[in-house]
Amino acid sequence: WLYAPMDTYIPLSKCPVAMTLHDIQAFEPNLPWSQSWQHKWFAYKWSRWVPKALADCRVVFTVSEFSKQRMVDLLNADPKKIEVIGNGVDASFFEIAKIDPTSLDRPIAFSEDKPFESPYIIIVGGLRQKKGADDVLAVARALRQRQSDLQIVVAGDSELKYIAAAQEHSNITLLGMVADLDLPRLLRCASSLLFLSPYEGFGIPALEAMAAGIPVVVADRASLPEIVGDAGIVVDPTMTEPIVDILINLDRMPQLRAECIQRGHRHAATYTWARCVDRVVNAFHTFA
């Protein structure tokens, strides 16, 4: 076998070839950015090789039933040769969950070089259109109107227009890229994770947050409902006021918070790299 564990087409015929294709966002026609020139160029480039890869590979691995179905629906791929493998959560997120967050040093607001003093909601992936930035800004605005002390802390690169927009909100802190070693603690000390992305092939931040021991609120879009199951709170990302109610309640209601954390931690524990390896090896035997 020759296996490419990323989006790569390798045109060989002397041995069976497998690859992992995480999603086919490039071919989605109805996303908010689908008509942009960047997306059209992205779609053109992928159209040069993805259909060939789906036809020629002995097996194609993907990360969710959602991604598999979109390959079938949009590209007429053969579902019998697509195997859903999933992803695993790094052990560091489970380890941090064993520590009482009140005993941890509060994460630093890098821009101000001081710890966060108020409870905060964590956003992972930056303020970007593809990560639901407009809906996040609406939540920040509503929190301020409610005079909530909940802050929104954003980890990851943000787009320039949203960096400018965030400056108008005193309850948003943009950290930029956060080191892998710092992310578990940043999650553990948060009140909740808010993940309003309109399109994810998988959505690993949701599971990492569950593993770290915090409640998770995700958009009812793409793969996210599938990945969090009944362990996460699934919302319409455009319904700002109900989302704010949920975020405030998760911070103020210990029993609700504890129930969400328990369900989430148990759910995340099923997403291991060992399970992924077993599925890959079994597929190699099946398709050999």
Image (cartoon, rainbow, N blue to C red):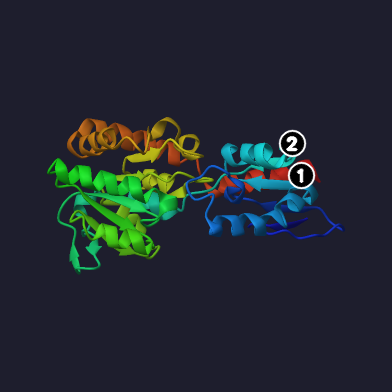
The image quarter containing residue 207 is: top left
* Residue denoted by label 1: 285
> Is residue 241 shown above or below 2?
above
Name the amino acid type tagged 1: His
- In the image, which disc is placed on residue 160? none
Task: State yes or no: discs 1 and 2 in contact (Cβ < 8 Å).
Answer: no
Disc 1 from disc 2: Cα separation: 15 Å
**Residue 120 seen in the figure:** yes
Residue 32: image location, x then y, percent: 47, 46
Please tell me how crowded label 1 is: few (under 14), some (14-19), or many (20+) other residues with Cα within 10 Å.
few
SS for dot 1 = helix
Residue 72: image location, x then y, percent: 68, 38
* Residue denoted by label 2: 80
Left or right of 88 on screen, residue 179: left
Name the amino acid type tagged 2: Lys
In which quadrant will I find the N terminus? Answer: bottom right
Name the residue: 36% across, 39% down: 237
Residue 126: image location, x then y, percent: 37, 57
SS for dot 2 = helix
